[in-house]
Amino acid sequence: MIERRRAKRMPFSMSLEISNLYKQDNVLVENINAPIEVVNISKTGIGFITKSVLPLGYYFNAIINLLDNDDLLRCVIKIIRSQPLEDGKTMYGCEFVGMADILSYIFDEYDRKLSGVQEANEENA
């Protein structure tokens, strides 16, 4: 299989709730209240699982804290693909929209943090 991802995916566990979705032509879907479980993240987007059916091409706002500090990513996320799962849930692939390249240092720090945890676990094994 050819790798088409533009950035390395890293495992990430976080719960969010989408309350509103919107499109660029001012179409708004309100009161969705869709709980989601973020399962991975990269410099270009996130992957999440939910029981809710969400439309492709819509956007939502999110605040993500990767490093458990004050570095919060306030971002707009666009839903670009979906894949049904066997348990009745759906896996969604999303991309960050309009995020400044300068914020990529947060992902680099998160990757270093993950690498340090993995090395420590290997040493203790």
Image (tube, rainbow, N blue to C red):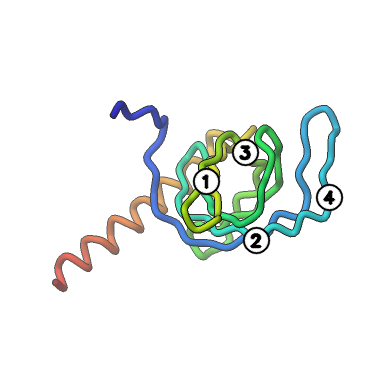
Q: Residue at x 34, y 57 (%)?
A: 114
Residue linked to disc 1: 84
Q: Earlier in the sequence, mark 2 or mark 1?
A: 2
Q: Earlier in the sequence, mark 4 or mark 2?
A: 4
What's the distance in space between the residues labelled 4 and 2, CA to CA? Answer: 14 Å
Q: Which percent across, then down, holds residue 62?
A: 66, 51
Q: Residue at x 78, y 49 (%)?
A: 20
Q: Is the residue under label 2 in contact with that under label 3 (CB below 8 Å)?
A: no
29 with respect to 76 (left or right):
right
Q: Amino acid at mark 2?
A: Pro
Total marks placed: 4
Q: Earlier in the sequence, mark 4 or mark 3?
A: 4
Q: Is the residue under label 4 in contact with that under label 1 (CB below 8 Å)?
A: no
Circle on res. 30: 4
Q: Earlier in the sequence, mark 3 or mark 2?
A: 2
What's the distance in space between the residues labelled 1 and 3, CA to CA? Answer: 14 Å
- The one nearer the camera, 56 or 106, is 56
What's the distance in space between the residues labelled 3 and 2, CA to CA? Answer: 15 Å
What's the distance in space between the residues labelled 1 and 4, CA to CA? Answer: 23 Å
